[in-house]
Image (cartoon, grey):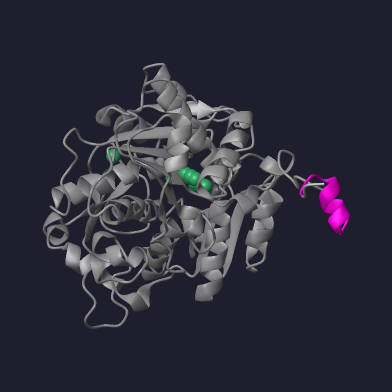
Amino acid sequence: MTSTLGATTTTSGTSAPASPARALVCRGCGKEYPLAAQHACYECFGPLEVAYDQAALARVTRAQIEAGPESIWRYAALLPAGQDPASRVTLDPGLTPLISAGQLAAEFGIRGPLWVKDDSANPTHSFKDRVVSVALTAARGLGFARFACASTGNLANSVAAHAARAGVPSIVFIPGDLEPGKVVTTAVYGGDLVAIEGSYDDVNRLCSELVETDEFEDTAFVNVNVRPYYAEGSKTLGYEVAEQLGWRIPEQVVIPMASGELLTKVDKAFSELVEIGLVEAPANGWRVFGAQSAGCNPIAVALHNGVSDIIPVKPVGIAKSLNIGDPAAGLYALEAVRRTGGWMDYASDDEIRDAIQLLARTTGVFAETAGGVTVAVLKKLVEAGKLDPDAETVVYNTGEGLKTIDAVAEQVGPTHRIKPSLRGARDAGLLDS
Ligand SMILES: *Cc1c(COP(=O)(O)O)cnc(C)c1O
Ligand SMILES: [Zn+2]
């Protein structure tokens, strides 16, 4: 792949605004590269990130965004691809509910406003639709003919569904021990689905090798060779929360971490909104909190140990969507949490199960295990005095409980089992005598 993005963004030929993306820039040494399918720096091997024309971003107005479509594409002027609607490879995700969670706040002794950003409401029921829409739109603009990914589950669903909608072949790679709810919801879209006898980190390593082969030269792996574009899609989870709060940034956000990318991009989104003058920062800034599971906690452990060396782990436990033992953006997540004065913690499988049920009972939101991780960590952060119970807090639910139903299947069930008669109801205590 030698093409670059700028040349091919406008497929309709005329009126679509240009992409505000300017270059790819190395997060390690700052070296810049053209907007191509490249994810690592040739000089220092650091990860590349999209850099923007700040003047173009600064021209974006609230009114322009508010007049846009009811999807992530209302923020197209702040994204690296998709300015021309005809160029989009998308299920139109985004504008998911921001739910006031007073009962949950009361359970945890939180007195300030508490909100749940419920991204399970996306088309394939996780936040991954945001990153995939941006990545695959960029990928098509770059001339790729097949879509792929290395997935912990939700990404597989989303890539397969986007490819199906666009009529493009797909091949997705998953660890062999994924939840059936994530295998079926990927396979149903009809692309190639490769289950690998190994962990996600093994899957990811293999994909990094495949992408270099001739047979995969035409293939965009959303989280490998087009990763810089993929990562930018996560910014919409920051923009959206700010807009839904009436163009305000919350004082605290609690975010689940797998690679750590989502956390860094929500923070980046808030910074951009302030820099381009669309919102004012809260008086004391915002604080970013990260959540992992006890079975896969390398980023949180590095924070707790006060170091910046992230020691990879072999993940275990039920929060499979977060089970990345060698997190690509871990260092940057640490940096964002330290810079903003936040914290990280991790939750055991039992705490995750309890938190899934508590969130469901108090908000009507049935989260997958990642949501359980985040809510369980919210509780710990309050108990440890790390999170200010009087400040405004947004907790992100990134996935849908129906995909990980086994996590709580043994804890909940019918509260009564009766014969189909009034007598049966009476015997069960549902009627007075
Ligand atoms: C992928 C995923 C995340 C985290 O993603 P990163 O950007 O890799 O940290 C969080 N929640 C769910 C449900 C996911 O599928
Ligand atoms: Zn570099």
**Residue 420 in magenta stretch:** yes
Looking at the image, which residue is at 39% across and 72% down? 88
Counting labels gives 0
Q: Is the N terminus in the top left, top right, bottom left or bottom right quadrant? A: bottom left
Q: Where is residue 324 in the image (x, y as percent from the top left)?
A: 53, 37
Name the spot of residue 430 as percent of width and height, x first: 76, 48
**Which residue sits at x=25%, y=29%?**
339
Ligand 2: quadrant of the figure: top left
Q: Is residue 279 above or below residue 293?
A: below
Tell which of 379 and 131 is nearer to you.
379
The answer to whether 269 appears left or right of 305 in the picture is left
Specify whether residue 328 is in view: no
Q: Give the range drawn in magenta.
A: 418-430
Please identify the residue farthest to the top as the structure is shown: 305
Look at the image and say whether residue 389 sits in the magenta stretch. no
Q: Can residue 335 be seen in this view?
A: yes
Q: Is residue 312 above or below residue 424?
A: above
